[in-house]
Image (cartoon, grey):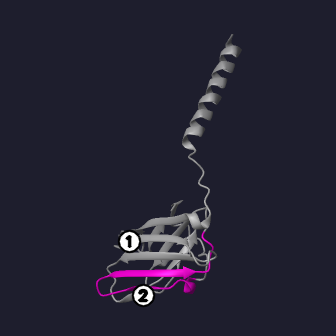
């Protein structure tokens, strides 16, 4: 009797777990590069100076979109708008695989990404065409770096890109 009860309980648990897995696994998005768009909001990062002091949060914000170039699908068009307390400066950025904060290597050398020119109002915008085929899966983010430096320690903000259909 005890064995039968354990077997029934185990079978019920398997059925319940299978039902849970089917509910939480959302639909798989299958898109071609021309059907896809990646978007994100730029979020400030906490900056640590390496000293025994509290980290400071940068005040950068903005939006990012990334689509395949309609004339040449092996290229990607990235549009970034941002607001920052920095004025009259060039700000570096890069497209990086994986999630924000992982320290991944950009998909191209950092100098392949057109800098964002920030005006006297602290607003900057760039539309850049990069020689990179728009991905239709995986995880990607945009790092915004302090000035013209492009090291992980110089990341001022990050935008975790989300894939969706146009």
Q: Going 32% across and 82% down the picture, which residue do you hit? A: 122
Report x, y in % for residue 50: 44, 74
In the image, which disc is placed on residue 46? none
Most extreme residue toward the front is 71
The answer for how far apart the CA atoms under marks 1 and 2 are is 16 Å
Magenta range = 110-134
Report x, y in % for residue 16: 59, 30
Q: Going 62% across and 56% down the picture, which residue do you hit? A: 30
In front of the other: 100 or 128: 128
Q: Earlier in the sequence, mark 1 or mark 2?
A: 1
In front of the other: 18 or 77: 77
**Residue 98 versus residue 13 in the image, above or below:** below
Q: Is any atom of residue 4 visible in this view? A: yes
Q: Is residue 120 magenta?
A: yes
| Residue picked out by circle 2 | 90
| Residue picked out by circle 1 | 62
Q: Going 45% across and 65% down the picture, which residue do you hit? A: 40
The 10 Å Cα crowd at callout 2, few under 14, some 14 to 19, many 20 or more, is: some
Most extreme residue toward the left is 121
Name the quadrant of the N terminus: top right
Q: Going 47% across and 70% down the picture, which residue do you hit? A: 65
Q: Is any atom of residue 99 visible in this view? A: no
Report x, y in % for residue 148: 47, 87
């Amino acid at each position: 009797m005890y064995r039968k009860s354990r077997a029934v309980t185990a079978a019920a648990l398997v059925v319940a777990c299978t039902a849970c897995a089917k509910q939480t696994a959302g639909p798989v998005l299958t898109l071609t590069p021309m059907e896809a768009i990646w978007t994100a909001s730029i979020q400030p990062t906490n900056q640590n100076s390496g000293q025994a002091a509290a980290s400071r949060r940068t005040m950068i914000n903005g939006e990012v979109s990334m689509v395949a170039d309609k004339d040449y699908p092996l290229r990607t068009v990235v549009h970034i708008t941002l607001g920052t307390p920095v004025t009259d400066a060039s700000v570096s950025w890069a497209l990086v695989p994986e999630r924000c904060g992982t320290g991944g290597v950009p998909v191209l050398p950092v100098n392949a990404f057109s800098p964002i020119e920030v005006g006297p109002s602290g607003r900057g915008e760039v539309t850049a065409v990069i020689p990179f085929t728009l991905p239709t899966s995986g995880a990607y983010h945009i790092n915004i770096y302090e000035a013209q430096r492009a090291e992980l320690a110089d990341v001022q903000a990050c935008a975790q890109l989300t894939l969706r259909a146009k």
